[in-house]
Amino acid sequence: MAESVYTEIEVAAPQATVFALLTDPDQIVRWIGTEANSDATPGGLFLVNVGGRHMARGEFTEVIPVHRLAYSFGWEDNETVPPGSSHVEIDLIARDAGTLIRFTHSGLPNAKERDSHRKGWEHYLSRLKITADGGHVDPDVPMKNM
């Protein structure tokens, strides 16, 4: 049975700012990865070198500017979660104080991968929150046990 990661976080930034942090390669590397290539259009490429160690690759399946993103997800050179084998959905909901981010990563093959991806997403979404809130995070570095 496929496994999923679900979380919500609130950030003190408008939807447009958060959307840019999720789609613009120069903004993506402010909170995740050491390099990124992103064409946020349906069928467009999502590619991020996470922690300077693992290349995440996918294809955008849904893009509603400032409101919603969905893309396939997986890791190059990984037989357990290869590119396109799972799916990330991100909804951005306007709030008085900023934006609520609803995040779902579905289609993970087992509990071990779910737990590993939950740990990674918790780490990186906390970095996204700091960045969206106007703070600064140090450049991404290789993470152990991910």
Image: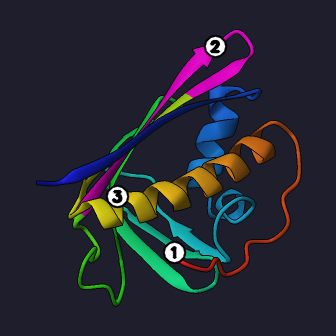
Residue 146 in magenta stretch: no
Residue 139 vs residue 4, the one in the foreground? 4
Q: Quadrant of the N terminus?
A: bottom left
Q: Main secondary structure of the magenta part?
A: strand
Which label belongs to residue 114? 3
Q: Is residue 74 above or below residue 30?
A: below
Q: Is residue 65 left or right of residue 84?
A: right
Which label belongs to residue 95? 2
Query: What kind of residue is marked 1?
Result: Met
Query: What kind of residue is marked 2?
Result: Arg
Q: Is residue 93 above or below residue 68?
A: above
C-alpha separation, residue under disc 2 versus residue under disc 3: 29 Å
Q: Which residue is found at the position 23% from the left and 63% from the top? A: 110
- Residue 43 visible from this viewpoint: no
- Residue 40 visible from this viewpoint: yes
Of badges 2 and 3, nearer the viewer stands: 3
C-alpha separation, residue under disc 1 versus residue under disc 3: 11 Å
Tell me the quarter of the picture where residue 62 sits.
top left
Q: Secondary structure at mark 1?
A: loop
Q: Which residue is found at the position 85% from the left and 66% from the top? A: 138
Color style of the picture: rainbow
Q: Earlier in the sequence, mark 1 or mark 3?
A: 3
Q: Residue furthest left?
A: 1
Residue 13 vs residue 5, the one in the foreground? 5
Q: Which residues are magenta?
A: 86-100
Query: What kind of residue is marked 3?
Result: Arg
**Which residue in the structure is indicated by mark 1?**
146
**Residue 18, position in %: x, y?**
64, 38
